[in-house]
Image (cartoon, rainbow, N blue to C red):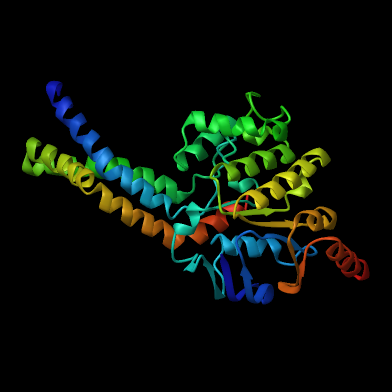
Amino acid sequence: MISIKNLKKSYKGIDAVDIGALEIQAGEVIGLVGNNGAGKTTFFRLLLDLIRSDEGEILSKGNDVTKTEEWKSYTAAYIDEGFLIDYLTPEEYFYFVGKLNRLSKADVDDFLQTYSAFFDDAILNKGKYIRDFSKGNQFKIGIIAALLSNPELLILDEPFANLDPTTQLRLVDMIKMMAAAKRMCILVSSHDINQVSEVSSRILLMEKGKIIKDIAGGETAYEELVDYFKVR
Amino acid sequence: MGWRILPIQLAAFLYGIGVNSFATIYAATYNYRYLNLGKSASMNFKGIGTAQWLQSLLFSFGPALIFYLLNKFAGFWVAIISISSLGIIGLAFHEMIINWLVAQFNIRKHKILEGFRAH
């Protein structure tokens, strides 16, 4: 689904992202790990055409993301609070995103119903604006809004970092379910090598903008990651 | 003035929809600063730079000046019809104009995104 060639982005002479070649297939759950400044968020922003690369190209289903707009109809992401409209209430925001995806209020309501456990009674019917919610709850809103569009490609930047343990485990289950049920491609970045090994089918380890390890997920992946991060 | 206020308001109405709406969106594509709508209106002077101030001046007094000059040198009805026509042309070509505005936005998109991230 995603094809990357010679992708380079540097800030003030330092490489933020330097990926020679990368192929991501539908059905994969990619866990992106790396220390701070490794380039994970920059990489996601490049994938979503939020930053312009210095060199190289990113193809989504064969089309250049910087030149076409079709990828937007099957791609959804949550990177940071900037993705939210903080002067709306969660309901207003969900209805707005619903409208963008041609969903009626009733459709949105049905959808939100299925995630009532995830919300844990902290989000809906609170009469608060999104800006007044905690960061963790804002993340919940962002993730669910991303799922509202029923995407084929889902990108989440460090979702585990901002969620409480119960919600983290719920998210892991949700991702596993989505990966099994549909032909979705999910990209998740994280500092939590536990959760990432648990949920990913493939793990990419980034350091200083480059992908230095590309391994299959699971138990051995966890060991390898612990090895790498311990030495550092 | 009396009855003249009615055609003037109609002309202003048409101009507002057909020209000013698009001009405002066009100016917005050059806006690289985040405006925090969460804060109260009174202390929100961060978004009001000289560019914005100049813009409001131009958009409200510009057509008024044109109307005044046309009214003085060509007559009341010429002025009314000119201002109204500008608005009607804008409305008639709205699809083309919107497409052009979207293209303009896409040209400056990354700069706008960068500015909005820094807040």
Task: Judge by depth and name the residue closer to the eye, A98 or A208.
Answer: A98
Residue A89 visible to an observer of this rendering: no
Whole-percent x and y of residue A188? 70, 56
Residue at the farthest top position: B2
Query: Quadrant of the rendered structure where residue A228 is?
Result: bottom right
Q: At x 55% / y 50%, what residue is drawn?
A: A151
Whole-percent x and y of residue A75? 54, 54
Give the answer, above or below, for where B78 lies relative to A157: above
Give the answer, above or below, for where A162 lies relative to A96: below
Residue at the farthest front position: A181
In this figure, what is the number of numbered marks? 0
Residue A154 visible to an observer of this rendering: yes
Q: Which image quadrant: the N terminus of chain A?
A: bottom right
Q: At x 38% / y 59%, what residue is drawn?
A: B104
Q: At x 9% / y 35%, what residue is drawn?
A: B76
Whole-percent x and y of residue B78? 8, 40
Q: Is residue B107 left or right of residue A183?
A: left
Task: Judge by depth and name the residue closer to the eye, A152 or B54.
Answer: A152
Q: Which image quadrant: the C terminus of chain A?
A: bottom right
Query: Quadrant of the rendered structure where residue B9 is?
Result: top left
Q: At x 48% / y 66%, what residue is drawn?
A: A66
Q: Is residue A136 left or right of residue A76?
A: right
Whole-percent x and y of residue B8? 18, 31
